[in-house]
Image: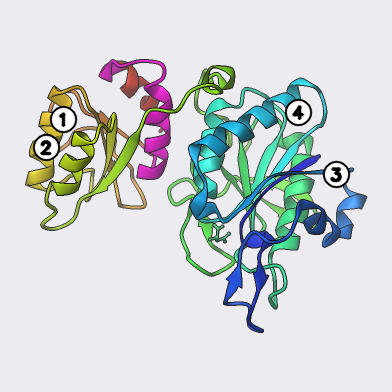
C-alpha cells in the first residue's frame, strides 16, 4: 500500500495543551507511518509526500498531479492499494475529482483527522490504520474512491463534512455510509453500495497539460443580489453552480442573471445549499439550458462541470453527466 500524504490536520502539531490551536501540515509521511506501528501487521507500506498543505489551500493543479501519481502507481503495478492522507476541509472535493478520473479498480482510500497529531485523543492514527486496512482489503476493489473517517466508510461522490470540529465529522446525508471498519476488518452494509457512478472516466492523460475550465459557485439567500454572479460572468467564468435555496431555487436577481448568462453561453448548474434531496429537475421557474445537479452538492457539481466542459459544450450532454448520479 502506498500512502500518499498531502498535509492537513492529521499532519498537524498543536501549540496549545488542549490541542485546539494548531498548525496543520507539519509532519512528513514517514512520521505519520511511524505513529502507527500496528500497520506493519496488516500491510507493507511505502510513503510518498505529494505536498504538505492545509486543504483549504488545495488546488485543481494538485488534483491533477495526484491523479497522475495514482495512475502511474497502478499502471506500473507498484501497489495493491493507495491511501491518501488529506486535510478534512476539502477532502470530499479531491476524493470526488479522483473518482471522476481514476479508471483503476484497485482501492483508493482517503483519510485525515479532526484533531492534530499531538492532541489528547488524536484521531489520525486510528483513521490511518483503518484506511490502510481498507486499501489492502479485496472487498474494497471496484468500489470507486472511498473515504474512511471515524470507523465509517463512505463513497467519494456521497460524502461531505458535516461538523467543524468533532471527530464524527463526515456523513453521506442521503445515502448513509457504505460500511464500517472494526478491528481492521471492513464490513460493507450492502453489496450494491459503492459502485462508481460515472460510466466512463475522464482521461487524466488529457488533463495533464491543460488548466481546467473556470467554474464558480454562487449562493442564494433571502435578498441575494446578482452582483457576485454578474461579476463572475464579466470576468470570464465558464460556468456557475448556484447553491440555491430549497429545491435549487434562487432570488429573482440571480434568476434574471442566470437566464442572461445561459443565453450568452455560460453554463449554469442549479444545485442546493440544502444537505439532503439534491435537485432532480427544474421544478419552479424552469428555463431552458440550465443543468440540474442531481444528488451532487454545489462543491461537487462544480468539479463535475469543470470536467464535463472539457468533453462537451452542449447543455444536454452536460446534463447527461449529472444524470448518472441519483
Ligand atoms: N483545515 C484543515 C485542513 O483541511 C482541517 C483538517 O484537516 O481537519 O487541512
Label number found at residue 73: 4
* In contact (CB < 8 Å): disc 1 and disc 3: no
Image location of residue 92, percent across then percent down: 51, 46
SS at circle 4: helix
What sort of colour scheme is used for the picture? rainbow
Are the residues at dot 3 and dot 2 in contact (C-beta closer than 8 Å)? no
- Determine the CA span between mark 1 and mark 3: 50 Å
Residue at which label 3 appears: 45
Query: Which secondary structure lies at badge 1?
Result: helix
Q: Earlier in the sequence, mark 3 or mark 2?
A: 3
Q: Are marks 4 and 1 in contact (CB under 8 Å)?
A: no
Taking the spot 74% from the left edge, 61% from the top edge, the residue there is 126
Name the disc covering residue 261, or none: 1
Say which mark, if any, is on residue 257: 2
| Closer to us: 86 or 129 | 86
Earlier-in-chain disc, 4 versus 1 = 4
Q: In the displayed structure, would residue 174 be above or below residue 213?
A: below
Query: Which residue lies most toward the bottom here?
Result: 17
* Callout 2 secondary element: helix
Q: Write the start and end of the magenta stretch as one range.
A: 295-316
1 and 2 marks in contact (CB < 8 Å): yes
The quadrant of the rendering that contains the N terminus is: top right
Q: CA distance from mark 3 to mark 2?
A: 52 Å
Separation (CA) of disc 1 from disc 2: 6 Å
Amino acid at each position: 500500500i502506498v500512502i500518499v500524504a498531502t498535509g492537513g490536520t492529521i499532519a498537524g502539531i498543536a501549540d496549545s495543551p488542549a490541542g485546539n490551536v494548531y498548525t496543520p501540515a507539519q509532519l512528513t509521511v514517514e512520521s505519520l507511518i511511524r505513529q502507527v506501528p500496528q500497520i506493519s501487521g496488516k500491510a507493507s507500506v511505502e510513503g510518498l509526500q505529494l505536498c504538505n498543505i492545509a486543504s483549504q489551500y488545495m488546488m485543481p493543479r494538485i488534483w491533477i498531479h495526484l491523479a497522475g501519481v495514482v495512475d502511474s502507481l497502478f499502471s506500473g503495478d507498484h501497489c495493491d492499494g493507495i491511501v491518501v492522507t488529506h486535510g478534512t476541509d476539502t477532502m470530499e472535493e479531491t476524493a470526488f475529482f479522483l473518482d471522476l478520473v481514476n479508471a483503476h479498480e484497485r482501492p483508493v482510500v482517503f483519510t485525515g483527522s479532526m484533531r492534530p497529531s499531538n492532541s489528547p485523543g488524536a484521531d489520525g492514527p486510528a483513521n490511518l490504520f483503518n484506511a490502510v486496512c481498507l486499501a489492502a482489503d479485496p472487498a474494497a476493489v471496484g468500489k470507486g474512491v472511498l473515504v474512511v473517517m471515524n470507523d465509517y466508510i463512505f463513497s467519494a461522490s456521497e460524502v461531505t463534512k458535516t461538523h467543524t470540529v468533532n471527530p464524527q465529522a463526515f456523513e453521506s446525508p442521503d445515502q448513509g455510509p457504505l460500511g464500517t471498519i472494526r478491528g481492521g476488518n471492513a464490513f460493507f452494509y450492502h453489496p450494491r453500495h459503492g459502485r462508481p457512478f460515472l460510466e466512463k472516466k475522464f482521461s487524466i492523460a488529457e488533463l495533464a497539460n491543460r488548466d481546467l475550465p473556470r467554474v464558480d459557485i454562487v449562493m442564494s439567500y433571502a435578498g441575494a443580489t446578482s452582483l457576485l454572479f454578474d461579476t463572475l460572468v464579466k470576468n470570464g467564468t465558464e460556468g456557475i453552480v448556484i447553491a440555491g435555496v430549497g429545491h435549487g431555487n434562487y432570488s429573482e436577481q440571480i434568476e434574471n442573471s442566470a437566464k442572461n448568462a445561459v443565453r450568452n453561453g455560460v453554463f449554469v448548474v442549479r444545485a442546493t445549499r440544502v444537505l439532503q434531496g439534491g435537485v432532480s429537475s427544474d421544478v419552479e421557474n424552469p428555463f431552458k439550458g440550465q443543468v440540474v445537479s442531481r444528488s451532487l452538492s454545489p462543491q461537487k457539481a462544480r468539479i463535475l462541470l469543470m470536467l464535463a466542459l472539457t468533453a462537451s459544450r452542449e447543455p444536454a450532454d452536460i446534463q447527461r453527466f449529472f444524470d448518472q448520479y441519483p
